[in-house]
Image: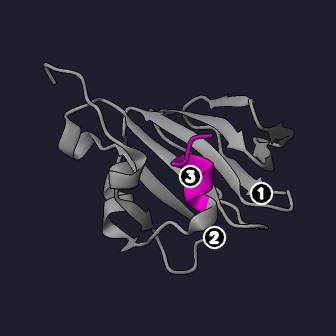
Amino acid sequence: MDQPLHRRARDCRVSRISPSDTNKFVMMVDPLVDNTPFISVVEIFEVGGKTPPNAHQDAHEMFYVLSGRGRAYCDGKTYDVEKGDTLVLPPRMEHVVENTGPDRLYCLTVMVPNEGFAELIRAGSTQSLDAADQAAIIDTP
């Protein structure tokens, strides 16, 4: 990349990895297209939704809570997260992130390096953003 990347959230690909998943991803930075060493998504967790248990061999993963409340389970420890909180996970740490609030949980998620995350998201089904999603990540006051 030899120039800045500028992309509007409303123009980003929205995907769900598996039909049974309770979260979807808005691909803000796609390393396969944008030639970056990382991936950045807005991850949208449905009420009661959570990630499957997972760990990344070499990647660091960061969650920044844009809105909502959740809980992260990381190698036997529990962390409650809410708007404005950051959680950074080192490689090989098994984790689950779940929405524990009454509304959707929105996280800006960054993984460095990509470690196949973009490929998983791209292989999933295309989704759309409803009015609540648009209000949370696109509309400005």
Q: Is residue 139 left or right of residue 36?
A: right
Q: Are the two marked residues, 2 and 1, in contact with CB atoms closer than 8 angstroms?
A: yes
**Image location (x, y in percent) of residue 65:** 69, 38
The disc labelled 3 sits on which kind of residue? Answer: Glu
Checking the image for residue 50, the label placed there is none
Question: Is the residue marked by circle 3 packed among few (<14), some (14-19), or many (20+) residues within 10 Å?
Answer: many
Q: Which is nearer the N-term, disc 1 or disc 3?
A: 3
Give the answer, above or below, for where 120 lies relative to 71. Answer: below
Q: The C terminus lies in which quarter of the figure?
A: top right
Mark 1 element type: strand
Earlier in the chain: of badge 3 and badge 2, it is 2
Residue at mark 2 to residue at mark 1: CA–CA distance: 10 Å
> Gap in Å between the C-alphas at discs 3 and 2?
10 Å
- Residue 99 image label: 1
> What residue range appears in magenta?
133-141
Is residue 89 or residue 121 the one in the foreground?
121
Q: Is residue 93 above or below residue 103?
A: above
In the picture of the structure, the residue carrying the numbered disc 2 is 22
User: Which residue is drawn at the image coordinates 21% and 37% (left, top)?
Assistant: 34
Q: Which image quadrant for residue 50?
A: bottom right
Q: Which residue is mark 3?
A: 43
Q: Which residue is nearer to you in this view: 15 or 78?
A: 15
Q: Residues within 10 Å of mark 2 (few under 14, many from 20)?
A: some
Coordinates of residue 41 in the picture (x, y in percent) = 46, 45
